[in-house]
Structure formats: structure tokens, C-alpha cells
Image: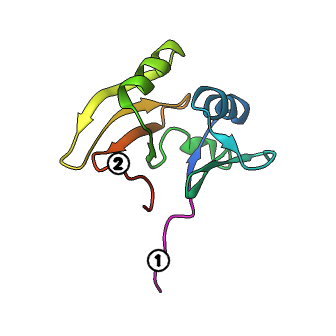
Amino acid sequence: MKIKGVDYVMYYVSDLKKSIDFYKNVLGLKPFEEPGDSWAEFEVGNLMFDIGTFDKDMAGKSAGVAFAVDDIKKSVEELKKKGVKILDENWETPVCHGVTIADPDGNKINLHKRKDGTAGAE
């Protein structure tokens, strides 16, 4: 077996409507199609980002995701105005820098910028 890439990242959420509003209207993600009764899917570059209420006990305990952005500082300013919880406002590695925020369930989201300017599978 050979893994070819990432098809989707999924978070468990406790309130689907509230989370759809956050990802769509606060972060500006584009819904892929109409949400189901217990899930929603968003297009994010070269992969899909899913949220679901399949297991509400897992809300806020799921794995992380990093969304590529063009300008970290501008993104932080915009999110602060929208009342988004900033967990780590400025982190850096030898190849990237970013900020860590939280969605309504406390799921950590990294907004990420590679120093070479690439994103996703580029």
C-alpha cells in the first residue's frame, strides 16, 4: 500500500450549526455541498475538511489541522476582531511560522505560512 496524500481532515464537533457558522463565516471556508444531518464538508485547497457530530464525546479532542494563509499578522488581526480565541499568537520553526486558534469546541487550528511561500502539496 502507498499513501498518495491527504483526502480530508475531520474534527468531531458538539454543535453542527454553530461549527458550520464558524468555519464558513468566521474562517471563510467554502462548503463543498449542503451539510448532512451530522456532518459538513469544506473545500480547502487540495483537500477536504470535514466536521461531524458522529461522536459528541470526542468534540474538542480530535487531531489538528494547519490551514495555509498568505499573511499571519493580518489573519490574527481579523480573527481577534471576530472574537476568535487565540491560543498561541506567534510560533516559528526553521521552515514556517503561524498562529494557533480554537474553534467553538476547543479544537486547535493552526494558521500556517511556509517561509518558501508554498502551500499544501506544492
Which residue range is magenta in the image? 1-8
Question: Which residue type carries mark 1?
Answer: Ile
Image-based side of 38 in relation to 117, left or right: right
Element marked by disc 2: loop
Residue occupying image coordinates x 60% and y 26%:
26
User: What kind of colouring is applied to the model shown?
Assistant: rainbow
Horizontal and vertical percent position of residue 114: 32, 47
Q: Is residue 49 magenta?
A: no
Residue lying furthest left in this view?
Answer: 94
Horizontal and vertical percent position of residue 99: 35, 32
Secondary structure, magenta segment, majority class? loop
- The front one of 97 and 109 is 97
Image-based side of 19 in relation to 63, left or right: right
Residue lying furthest front in this view?
Answer: 117
Up-down relation of residue 76 to residue 94 (above or below): above
Question: Which residue type carries mark 2?
Answer: Gly
Picture quadrant of residue 12? top right
- Mark 1, Cα crowd under 10 Å, few <14 / some 14-19 / many 20+, is few
Residue receiving disc 2: 117
